[in-house]
Image: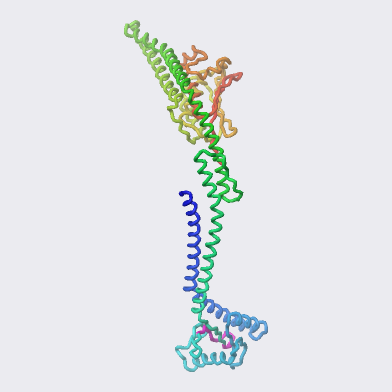
């Protein structure tokens, strides 16, 4: 019942809106006719009289009043707009006349002239002005103009004002009849058209209802080229997509049955993690304990030796603190507790700012850093984690930089990605170690790693960060050094 009501309501709404528009348009036309048609009619009459006067004045100046071409033009104009026109000279000789009642119009002109000349009648209209007059005998109203042309002739222009009010009433009555017929015909047409329009919508509603029951076999078959057809195509695509996704979900549900194995694996990872942490902390703790006991027992009394012992303790404690922080970061990344915040930022500026802050480290190691000159490159990524990845790569490059002691940073755009690479001159990574460098606590050269305070966690953090952002990363050997790289998604600036 709900679907039926929906189908009827759409059609009714369209019919009601159309009917309202038709009635509103009809009412506006009636109101405009009633209020403004009479004024418009009189305004047009005034304009016609003024036009006739201007033509007469121009012909008088050009001395063409009595030419055949001008009189034919005036006859046509007077006939078209139901006007009576007469021009006489100072001797009352007719120069031009466009009227069926020449004598009557002549008498009216002479009457106006006589009243103006001999009686100075205040009620007499002014010369060369348009005015209204009423013929008492016929009860007919006229719009008239009389006076003299600059060439000296007298003229009169007269046009009867029909009873426009009656015409307005008749026009509105006719408009009402036509409007009623138009409304009835419009309702029938709209009802038929909306039936055709709503039919494919009913079909789409039925398809969507079957989709709620996970029945994806039915497809929209409409062949029209309207927006409804586009909606039908999208629903077909949605149906196919939902079918695939449900299939994928069922597959994923089967995979969830392997949770026990995953839990066991996680337990093994936890034990391995604790074992590695214990192993890594054992050496610094032993050093701290040994040097602290030496201080307590006063093995060396001189200040220089005591300062050395204290420096060793502080250095080892700092290494432990750094390792614990990195392990906490790695733990959050691996267990999904750290939220990745995708942002739009300029990766070139980020790296330039980091290099500026690492300037002291670069100078201490006598390293020459080269960076490819490039315009800003905007990417989508987690800005803080991107800096963490670059910092780990750059720190490794500094610690292993040998020979020419050059670090080269480059940017390469391709296929919607930007690859950021950090190359350092020095020894290659042994081929057998390349696949293990991403493992926690793995060290290629344990003695050297111990020397600069490394703990084998940095590249594990890189691996975890890049995988959370679903981007590629890697380390490659070159004949004169090692290149570390990672990729980020470019912002589409189009």
Residue 455 x %, y %: 46, 17
Is residue 410 one of those drawn in magenta? Answer: no
Q: Which residue is drawn at 34% across and 5% down?
A: 299
Q: Residue at x 44, y 30 (%)?
A: 339
**Whether residue 95 can be seen here:** yes
Q: Is residue 410 left or right of residue 273?
A: right
> Picture quarter containing residue 327?
top left
Magenta stretch? Answer: 141-154
Number of numbered labels in the structure image: 0
Residue 143 x %, y %: 52, 83
Residue 331 x %, y %: 43, 22
Nearer the observer, 333 or 449: 333
Q: Residue at x 33, y 7 (%)?
A: 301
Tell me if residue 413 comes above or below residue 271 in the rendering: below
Residue extending farthest to the right is 68
Nearer the observer, 89 or 420: 420
**Whether residue 128 can be seen here:** no
Q: In which quarter of the image is the C terminus?
A: top right
Tell me if residue 41 comes above or below residue 278 in the rendering: below
Nearer the observer, 471 or 308: 471
Residue 259 x %, y %: 47, 23
Q: Is residue 99 left or right of residue 458?
A: right
Query: Does the magenta stretch mainly form a helix, a strand or a loop?
Result: strand
Colouring rule applied to residues = rainbow
Q: Which residue is drawn at 54% across and 66% down?
A: 182
């Amino acid at each position: 019942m709900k679907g039926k009501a929906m189908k009827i309501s759409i059609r009714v709404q369209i019919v009601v809106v159309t009917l309202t528009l038709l009635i509103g348009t009809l009412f506006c036309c009636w109101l405009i006719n009633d209020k403004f048609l009479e004024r418009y009619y009189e305004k047009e009459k005034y304009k016609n009289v003024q036009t006739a006067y201007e033509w007469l004045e121009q012909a008088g100046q050009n001395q063409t009043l009595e030419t055949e071409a001008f009189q034919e033009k005036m006859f046509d104009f007077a006939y078209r707009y139901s006007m009576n026109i007469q021009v006489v000279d100072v001797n009352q000789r007719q120069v031009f006349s466009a009227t069926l009642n020449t004598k009557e119009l002549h008498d009216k002109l002479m009457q106006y002239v006589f009243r103006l000349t001999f009686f100075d009648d205040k009620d007499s209209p002014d010369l060369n002005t348009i005015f209204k007059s009423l013929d008492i005998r016929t009860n007919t109203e006229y719009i008239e103009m009389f006076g003299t042309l600059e060439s000296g002739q007298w003229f009169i222009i007269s046009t009867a004002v029909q009873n426009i009010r009656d015409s307005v009433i008749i026009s509105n009555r006719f408009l009402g009849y036509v409007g009623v017929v138009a409304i009835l015909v419009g309702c029938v047409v709209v009802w038929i058209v909306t039936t055709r329009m709503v039919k494919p919508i009913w079909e789409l509603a039925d398809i969507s209802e079957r989709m709620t029951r996970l029945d994806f076999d039915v497809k929209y078959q409409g062949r029209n080229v309207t927006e409804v057809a586009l909606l039908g195509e999208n629903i077909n695509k949605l149906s196919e997509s939902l079918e695939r996704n449900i299939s994928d979900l069922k597959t994923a549900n089967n995979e969830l049955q392997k949770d026990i194995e995953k839990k066991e694996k996680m337990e093994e990872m936890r034990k391995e993690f604790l074992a590695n942490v214990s192993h890594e902390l054992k050496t610094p703790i032993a050093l701290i304990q040994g040097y602290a006991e030496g201080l307590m027992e006063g093995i060396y009394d001189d200040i220089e030796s005591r300062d050395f012992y204290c420096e060793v303790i502080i250095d080892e404690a700092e290494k432990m603190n750094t390792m614990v922080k990195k392990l906490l970061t790695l733990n959050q990344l691996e267990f999904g507790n750290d939220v990745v915040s995708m942002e739009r930022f300029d990766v070139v500026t980020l790296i330039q700012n980091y290099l500026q802050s690492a300037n002291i480290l670069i100078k201490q190691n006598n390293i020459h850093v080269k960076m490819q000159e490039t315009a800003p490159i905007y990417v989508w990524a987690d800005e803080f984690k991107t800096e963490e990845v670059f910092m780990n790569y750059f720190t490794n490059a500094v610690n292993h930089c040998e020979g020419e002691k050059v670090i080269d940073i480059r940017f390469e755009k391709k296929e919607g990605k930007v690859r950021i690479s950090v190359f350092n001159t020095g020894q290659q990574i042994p081929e057998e170690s390349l696949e293990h460098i991403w493992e926690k606590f793995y060290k290629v050269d344990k003695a050297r790693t111990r020397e600069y305070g490394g703990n084998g966690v940095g590249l594990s953090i890189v691996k975890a960060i890049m995988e959370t952002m679903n981007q590629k990363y890697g380390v490659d050997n070159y004949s004169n050094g090692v290149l570390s790289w990672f990729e980020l998604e470019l912002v589409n600036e189009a």
